[in-house]
Amino acid sequence: MGTKGSKVVARNKKATHDYHIEETFEAGIVLTGTEIKSIRQGRVNLQDAYARVNNGEVFVVGMHISPFEQGNRYNVDPTRTRKLLMHKKEINKLIGQTKIKGLTLIPLDLHLRDGFAKLQLALGKGKKQYDKRASAAKRDADRMIERKLKEQNR
């Protein structure tokens, strides 16, 4: 059986702006039938979503999946808390990192791999305001250097 690859459905653009990403994990999501259909249509928002560990299980909170148009009564609450599927070893590592180091679990993107919805999670440390300004200045400087190099090569 061949793999179909993965297709990114939704991306959390503010995650890299607001956090220093330290490590990433991939997790499956427990969904209903109408939710996966909405995801395949790309009707997902990860803007204010975060993940937390509760009683040895990982949950994503605040991820908005729009109701499926033909779903009728089978549609569920768009922002309900959804369980994530991860290996016990990974969950124990997350518990240690979030409790001891004070890191946050942030969803980076939601993608489809082999027909299954997967959530890319990251352990991140919150950036301070001056860190955000410094990374914006570095990005602008890199763009300027790239532009100058392009002009020289013409």
Image (tube, rainbow, N blue to C red):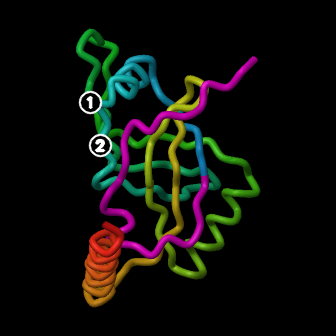
Is residue 123 one of those drawn in magenta? no
**Quarter that holds the N terminus:** top right
Could you say which is closer to the camera, residue 98 or residue 107?
Answer: 107
In the image, is residue 116 above or below residue 15? Answer: above
Question: Where's residue 109, x and y in %?
Answer: 44, 48
Could you say which is closer to the camera, residue 61 or residue 7?
Answer: 7
Question: What residue lies at 53% left-to-right and 67% top-to-bottom?
Answer: 123
Q: Residues within 10 Å of mark 1 (few under 14, many from 20)?
A: many
Residue bearing the label numbered 1: 66
Mark nearer the N terminus (2 vs 1): 2
Left or right of 152, for residue 54 = right
Residue bearing the label numbered 2: 45
Question: Where's residue 110, x and y in %?
Answer: 45, 42
Left or right of 137, for residue 107 = right
Asked if the residues shown at circle 2 and circle 1 are in contact, with their CB atoms under 8 angstroms apart, the answer is yes
Give the residue furthest to the bottom.
Answer: 130
Q: Residues within 10 Å of mark 2 (few under 14, many from 20)?
A: many
**Quarter that holds the C terminus:** bottom left
